[in-house]
Image (cartoon, rainbow, N blue to C red):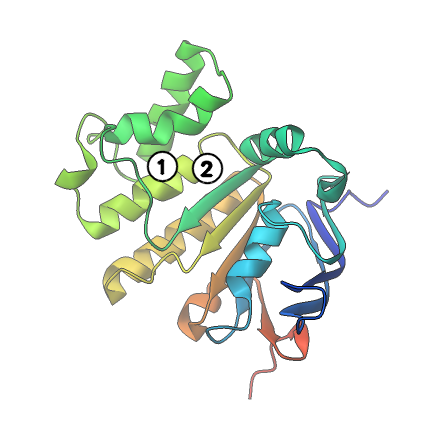
Amino acid sequence: MTATPVLQCRGLGKRYSPAGVALLDDINLELHAGEYLAIMGESGVGKSTLLNLLAGLEQPSAGQVILDGTDLGALDDDTATLLRRRSVGFVFQAFHVLPYLSVGQNVALPLDLLGTPMPERGERTRAMLAAVGLETLGARMPRELSGGETQRIAIARALVHRPRLVLADEPTGNLDPRNAAQTLELLRSQVKAQAGAGILITHSRAAADTADRILVLDARGLHAFANG
């Protein structure tokens, strides 16, 4: 029997007024555990909007988003928030670490929100810091870190609760080429190690090449990348 996809989109569309031009129209996508997908597109084509729809942060104008067999559109706000908190990890271009929490506290935050018992919380946080090469920095504050280190903290935080789906929105946009390459490899390897599924939103071909497959979002919709 075929495993249930981690994520399915069926006829997904988004417009911001009833009479407005559709920003996204008839988006169809299926993603299974172990897959790491890149979605490329120019600025303004709706990449971030698509990510918000996939996470249930925005409601579609048409179609469905199904996460681990659950139709996000059928959930009330509280239930959708709980599902997102448990099953989705986010990595952003701007890092979004909390400056008043230590490195370890930032990484542990998803576990705190899920009510994970303290011994397990500490063990998983330490393991995740070690996985991203920052095991000695748990007591430091974010202001003491470099940009590359800060993005590694964001990746650790996105993965510490072992989400089924990781969504990364231009995660290397604020990094130099060396740190960007390291961040992309770390993100891919950690998604694979946890047997989850990942989507990388990017405008960069070099970043997209780190994924298992590439799709392009443009005025025609979402379609396979054609090299050359």
Q: Mark 1: few, some, or many residues within 10 Å (few <14, many ≥20)?
A: some
Eyeballing the image, is 163 above or below 216?
above
Q: Considering depth in this image, is 139 or 220 the residue closer to the camera?
A: 220
The quarter of the rendered structure image containing the N terminus is top right
Q: Position of residue 92 (x, y in %)?
A: 40, 51
Q: Considering depth in this image, is 103 or 50 the residue closer to the camera?
A: 50
Eyeballing the image, is 152 above or below 35?
above
Amino acid of disc 2: Leu
Q: Position of residue 33 (x, y in %)?
A: 65, 45
Amino acid of disc 1: Ala
Separation (CA) of disc 1 from disc 2? 10 Å
Q: Position of residue 134 (x, y in %)?
A: 25, 36
Quadrant for residue 18, please give it: bottom right
Q: Mark 2: few, some, or many residues within 10 Å (few <14, many ≥20)?
A: many
Q: Which mark is residue 116?
A: none
User: What residue is drawn where x is 45% and y is 74%?
Assistant: 205
Is 111 on the left-hand or right-hand side of 4? left
Dot 1 or dot 2: first in sequence order is 1
Q: How many marks?
A: 2
Which residue in the rendered view is the most extreme toward the right? 1
Q: Position of residue 228 (x, y in %)?
A: 55, 89
Q: Nearer the viewer, mark 1 or mark 2?
A: 2
User: What residue is drawn where x is 70% and y is 33%?
Assistant: 76
Q: Which mark is residue 131?
A: 1
Q: Which residue position holds label 2?
A: 159
Is 27 on the left-hand or right-hand side of 126? right
Secondary structure type for disc 1 = helix
Eyeballing the image, is 156 above or below 173?
above
Circles 1 and 2, Cβ within 8 Å, touching? The answer is yes
